[in-house]
């Protein structure tokens, strides 16, 4: 394997690590409102319900799935494009 092939392979690995790091932080940041939703007093919960259901939870689910099963999705798309 030539040096240029190794550097390209290392670059893609670095990009994957950066993507996973960003997804982890998105997952952590979007988890904070869920804690507020669960542990807040009952009166303000209706104010948080809609954004939590339609923004926070889907982002959490998608980022979690991408972190755990992103390699499968990438493999599916690479087979279709080939």
Image (cartoon, rainbow, N blue to C red):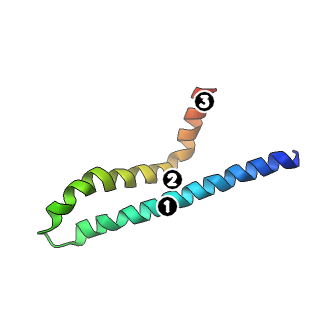
Residue at image mark 3: 79
Circle 1 sits in a helix, a strand or a loop, which is it? helix
Residue at image mark 1: 24
Residue at image mark 2: 67
Q: Is residue 32 above or below residue 69?
A: below
The residue at the point 61 percent across, 33 percent down is: 78
Label pair 2/1, CB-CB below 8 angstroms: yes
On screen, residue 3 versus residue 33, left or right, reads right
The residue at the point 55 percent across, 61 percent down is: 21
Circle 2 sits in a helix, a strand or a loop, which is it? helix
**Separation of marks 2 and 1 at Cα, in angstroms:** 8 Å
Precedes in sequence: disc 1 or disc 3: 1
The residue at the point 37 percent across, 61 percent down is: 30
Q: Is residue 66 above or below residue 23?
A: above
Q: Is residue 48 above or below residue 12?
A: below
Precedes in sequence: disc 2 or disc 3: 2
Circle 2 crowding by C-alpha within 10 Å: few under 14, some 14–19, many from 20: some
Circle 1 crowding by C-alpha within 10 Å: few under 14, some 14–19, many from 20: some
Residue 46 in the image, given as x and y percentages of width and height? 14, 61
Circle 3 crowding by C-alpha within 10 Å: few under 14, some 14–19, many from 20: few
On screen, residue 31 versus residue 12, left or right, reads left
**Separation of marks 2 and 3 at Cα, in angstroms:** 20 Å
**Separation of marks 1 and 3 at Cα, in angstroms:** 27 Å
The residue at the point 51 percent across, 53 percent down is: 67
């Amino acid at each position: 394997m030539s040096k240029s092939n190794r550097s390209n392979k290392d670059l893609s690995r670095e990009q994957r690590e950066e993507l996973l790091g960003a997804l982890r932080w998105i997952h952590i940041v979007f988890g904070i409102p869920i804690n507020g939703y669960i542990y807040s007093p009952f009166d303000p919960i209706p104010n948080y319900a809609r954004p939590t259901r339609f923004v926070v939870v889907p982002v959490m689910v998608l980022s979690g799935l991408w972190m755990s099963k992103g390699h499968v999705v990438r493999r599916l798309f690479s087979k279709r494009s080939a």
